[in-house]
Image (cartoon, rainbow, N blue to C red):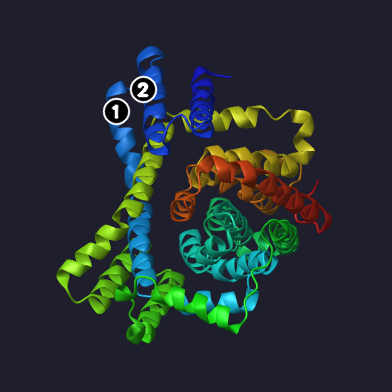
Amino acid sequence: MEVLSILAFAMILTFMGLIMAKKMQPVTALILVPLVFAIIATYIFGYGDPWKISKWMIDGVKQISPTFTMLLFAIMYFGIMIDVGLFDPLVVRILKIVKGDPVKILVATVCTTAVVALDGDGSTTFMIIVTAFLPLYLKLGMSPVVLALFTLMTNNVLNIIPWGGPTARVMAALQLDASDVFNPLVPGMIASFIFLVILAYFVGVKERKRLGIMEMDEAHLKEVEAKITGEKKELKRPQLFWVNLVVTLCLLAALLSDKFPLGIIFAVGTSIALTINFRDVKEQGRRLAAHASEALNVVMVIIGAGCFMGILAGSKMDAALTQTLVEMIPESLGPHMALITAIISAPGTFFLSNDAFYYGIVPILAKTAAVYGITPAEIARASLMGQPIHFLSPLVGALWLLLGITNVSLADIQKYGLPVALGMMLIYIVVGGIFGAIPL
């Protein structure tokens, strides 16, 4: 193992250790840890020009600029829509259906997330689901960690649809059609969804024993409804409900069309929402200020992640890491390259960006596997089976959005999410083997 690869592993482990131990804020760790290791790599070991470190960081930030632009305006847009009460009827409707039963709330969380996540964009899914369900969780005394966990894991199931990020990348990298990659994975997706519904049921039963069922007769429901719709009443715009709904549906349609940059869609949507709902310029400023801290925290972390990825790529640590992972595979395990790829995809997509993994590592694995008669399509499917682990990575922008709006820490979501993600990954592998998606 070469020095650069060792430094890459050490950098990642140091970062994760500091985050898990809660010794540093994510944004400071994302910037300072790679900076220190970049200085060590360039000044001490002579890997690259130390004066280019700042350029690497800027290059990384440029790459993720569309992401933090989108998140900034997405938080603003949905924050404004929450203020004006667009989602109040949905919250009230869900409350009437579940009637204070934690089991029904958790199962409804999974099922609703699965529907919303069909748009293929995790950030939008998280904003919509948390907006609808967080008030219910808080009202019943349920933990926001549970909401974040099941929203994240259910989104993982839908993350491998053909118009989702990882599948599109692997299809492009290996020049495959959606039918070759996606269709054989559907049984695994169904099995993973059933697994989450069952898990949600049992967690709900546990929560029901802890909290009980909040009995809600018609009078109580009306009282809760009045509280929901009456909160910050001066900001509510019930007379503009249909206007705001049409604007939001148009925004979601634009997202699904894939014709416009996401950041521009939300920027325009935010501008329209402010103009329609708040005619007074000072009030518009107050609404922006009200959501600025939440948006700023998320954007700072995303910029930090850009610095991290920029140094990883600019210093060639990601290439060294890729080569080391490939060289670690013994030749005797060649016939099992699909299974190995599925296993590697977990740490691969956790420690590296999707771009680095699917454009850098997967083509190498596919070429190696071809020697043993394993097709590129089988390697492509296998490479997607570690995606449940990927969404626990601190390099995923949408994760920070979810953590920010639920006020859940990265350490908590990784602590409770990792066993669930590993279970989902195992389901993908086993079901994939049974239905012939990958050769075991």
The residue sitting at 54% across, 30% down in the picture is 321
Position of 31 with respect to 131 (left or right) is left
The residue that mark 1 highlights is 52
The residue sitting at 64% across, 59% down in the picture is 157
Quarter of the image with the N terminus is: top right
For marks 2 and 1, give the CA distance.
Answer: 8 Å
Callout 2 touching callout 1 (CB < 8 Å): yes
Is 401 above or below relative to 20? below
Position of 242 with respect to 392 (left or right) is left
Closer to us: 93 or 40: 93
The residue that mark 2 highlights is 48
Going by the numbered disc 2, the residue's amino acid type is Gly
The residue sitting at 76% across, 36% down in the picture is 334
Residue at the limit of the structure toward the left, as seen here: 281
Going by the numbered disc 1, the residue's amino acid type is Lys
Q: Residues within 10 Å of mark 1 (few under 14, many from 20)?
A: some
Closer to us: 199 or 50: 199
The residue sitting at 66% across, 64% down in the picture is 102
Residue 189 horizontal/vertical position (percent): 70, 61
Closer to us: 333 or 259: 259
